[in-house]
Amino acid sequence: MNLILLGAPGSGKGTQAKFLVRKYSIPQISTGDLLREEVKAGTPLGRKAKEYMDKGLLVPDEVVVGMVEERLKKEDCKGGFILDGFPRTVAQADALGITLNRMNKSLSKVILVKVDEEELVRRLTGRRVCEKCGAGYHVMFDPPKTEGICDKCQGRLYQRDDDKESTIRNRLKVYNEQTAPLIEYYRKKNLLAEINGMGVIEEIFDRIRRAFE
């Protein structure tokens, strides 16, 4: 079972990926984690990626795809994998398709977790962090016992700039611009399953499971 998980920031796809890992014993592959691991290990691909990262540039597609290919060759991917946050563009999707063909692998499904934009904004702007100990809270889903005060150290809770509404809306705009062509790309290949990401976590997981079982 070879899956791609798509979803906007705040859609809960990270949580659903963990459920899939536990249920099907297949690895979740995040390109962000891969980049950090390759750079830390000092592999040829990691060294190449570091050159771009040090200059504040995006790592080229061929380097990222190369890392994904190396990861897919590992033993734990024989039973399947979940690609999380990759591909991000149609060019990356094309390159991934060529790579999978070369490895005699194919995608089972591309799961798109859909959540209304206003709900995404509500979820993402509700995050709070303690300025003393760094503990995280959410005003709706995981509030502190006393508003604005950390349960652990009584430090003041604040909202990071990343979690402010204007920043969130900009992130969602970029995501939509990048991902809309990708959604159409996989829809044309009859691989896309659109899942309602609203509701109880277990219910959403059940919808995802039904999409490919």
Image (cartoon, rainbow, N blue to C red):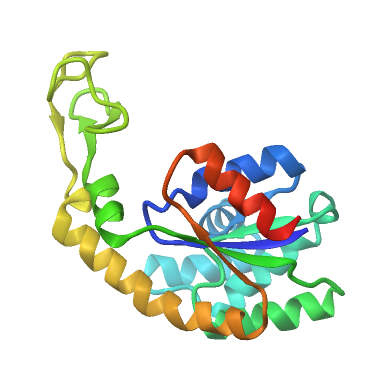
The reply, left or right, for residue 149 in relation to residue 124 is: left
Residue 160 seen in this snapshot = yes
For the point 44% across and 75% down, the residue is 179
For the point 48% across and 73% down, the residue is 59
The percent position of residue 15, horizontal first and vertical second, equals 51, 43
The reply, left or right, for residue 71 in relation to residue 61 is: right
Nearest the viewer among 113 and 165 is 113
Q: Quadrant of residue 43?
A: bottom right
Nearest the viewer among 140 and 87 is 140
Looking at the figure, which quarter contains the C terminus?
bottom right
Nearest the viewer among 159 and 110 is 110
For the point 53% across and 68% down, the residue is 49
Residue 56 seen in this snapshot = no
For the point 38% across and 74% down, the residue is 57
Looking at the figure, which quarter contains the N terminus?
bottom right
Note whether 12 is above or below 39 in the view shown: above
The percent position of residue 155, horizontal first and vertical second, equals 15, 19
